Image (cartoon, rainbow, N blue to C red):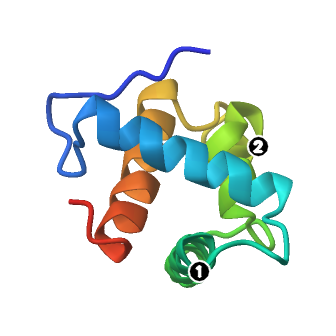
Amino acid sequence: MRHYIPHKNNPDWLPHNIYMQIFYLIRDYEEGIPSDAVSGRRTQKTAIEKVIMFLKEEYKKRPATYGEINPVRAFFEYPYFSMMFTQSGREMGAGKRRWNLYRCHFARLVAEELRLH
């Protein structure tokens, strides 16, 4: 899977190496961090959880919501993201560019929480 990071009109742009670090952290979070993890891993887990709660609140503020969102699933699955962010009155869901921008936004929030960016 390629990880395209839009450069134009992207306020959440990150350098590729930081984006990939955050991508792997989010992937590991989805798989579950062991309970005997070192303190650095616990810090990463809490940072991701804070961002997830922020994104859930941000989603609830939208005028048309489609139930409870799972931000991690939306980060990895385009069909799920497209369904959750479909605008009313449109037959098609959100585009791939919008999904890539969402992924960059999620990654930037985690990077800021971990003070990497």
Q: From the viewer's perspective, is residue 59 above or below residue 99?
A: below
Q: Quadrant of residue 38?
A: bottom right
Farthest-out residue, top: 2
Which residue is rendered at x = 56% and y = 37% of the image? 94
The answer to whether marks 1 and 2 mark residues whose Cβ atoms lie closer than 8 Å is no
Which residue is rendered at x = 49% and y = 78% of the image? 58
Q: Is residue 35 left or right of residue 22?
A: right
- Mark 2 crowd level (few <14, some 14–19, many ≥20, 10 Å Cα): some
Q: Position of residue 3 (x, y in %)?
A: 47, 23
Under tag 2, what secondary structure?
A: helix
Which residue is rendered at x = 82% and y = 76% of the image? 36
Q: Is residue 53 left or right of residue 107?
A: right
**Amino acid at pointer 1:** Ser
Q: Which residue is more in the foreground, 96 or 29?
A: 29
Q: Quadrant of residue 64?
A: bottom right
- Mark 1 crowd level (few <14, some 14–19, many ≥20, 10 Å Cα): few
Q: Is residue 22 left or right of residue 45?
A: left
Q: From the viewer's perspective, is residue 107 above or below residue 103?
A: below
What residue is disc 2 on?
Answer: 80
Quadrant position of the N terminus in the picture:
top right
Quadrant position of the C terminus in the picture:
bottom left
Q: Is residue 88 visible?
A: no
Using the image, tell me which numbered label, if any, was put on residue 39.
1
Q: From the viewer's perspective, is residue 95 above or below residue 36?
A: above
**Amino acid at pointer 2:** Tyr
